[in-house]
Image (cartoon, grey):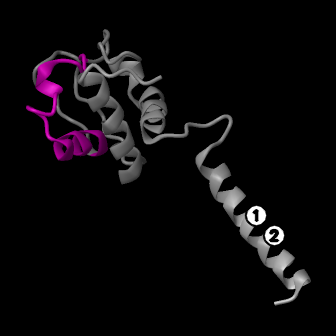
Amino acid sequence: MGVRHGRVVLAVVATAAMGSLAAGCSADGPTTALERGERIYQANCAQCHAADLAGNDRGPSLLSPIYGPEQLSDADFADAVRNGVPEQRWEFGPMPGNGALSDEQIDAMSMFVRARQAGDRPD
C-alpha cells in the first residue's frame, strides 16, 4: 500500500469514527439512554405526571408504589404508554396512548422513570 493510499484510508476511517462519536455525543442533545429517556419523558409525560414524576392536577404520581416495577412490569408500562389506559384508580380520566414513540424511545423513558422510582437522580 502506498503512502498516498494509506492517507486516504486513514482519512476515511477517521471521518467515520468522528461521525459515530458525534452521533452519540451531541453538544445540544442527550448523550446517554437515561438522558434521552428524561428528554422523552419531559416532552411527552411531564404535562400530566409532572417534571419530577410527582403528579399534578392532570395525572397521578409515577412515584406511587403501584407504578413501581414490583406492581407494573416494564412490558405493561410500555403498553400503557403506547395504547393508553382507561380511568382506573384515580379521577383524572383516561390516559391517552402515544403510538408515535418507538420501542427504543419507550425503553429509554422507562429506564428514566425506573431510575427515579428507585431514588436515582440523573446528573
How many numbered discs sit on the rendered protein? 2
Quarter holding residue 121: top left
**Drawn side of residue 12 relative to residue 57, left or right:** right
- Front residue (pair 18, 69): 18
Residue at figure coordinates x 91%, y 82% from the top left? 4
Q: Is residue 74 above or below residue 19?
A: above
Is residue 24 visible to the viewer in this orientation of the structure? yes
Q: Where on the picture, by quarter, is residue 74?
A: top left
Residue in the image at 67% along x and 50% along y: 22
Residue projecting furthest to the top: 57
**Looking at the picture, which amino acid does disc 2 mark?**
Ala
Q: Is residue 14 above or below residue 39?
A: below
Please tell me whether residue 64 belongs to the stretch shown in magenta.
yes
| Disc 1: which residue | 15
Which stretch appears magenta? Answer: 60-82
**For residue 71, side relative to residue 78 (left or right):** left
- Graded by Cα atoms within 10 Å as few (under 14), some (14 to 19) or many (20 or more), the crowding at tag 2 reads few
- Look at the numbered discs 2 and 1 and tell me whether their residues touch, using CB distance below 8 Å: yes
- For image coordinates 17% across by 18% down, the residue present is 64
Report if residue 102 is visible in the image.
no
Q: Position of residue 116 (x, y in %)?
A: 31, 23
Residue corresponding to mark 2:
11
Is residue 104 positioned above or below 98 on the image?
below
Numbered tag placed on residue 75 in the rendering: none
Q: Residues within 10 Å of mark 1 (few under 14, many from 20)?
A: few
Name the residue: 25% across, 38% down: 84
Query: Which element carries disc 2, helix, strand or loop?
Result: helix
Q: Which kind of residue does numbered mark 1 sit on? A: Thr
Q: Residue 110: where, in percent of width, then height?
A: 31, 38
Say whether residue 71 is left or right of residue 99: left
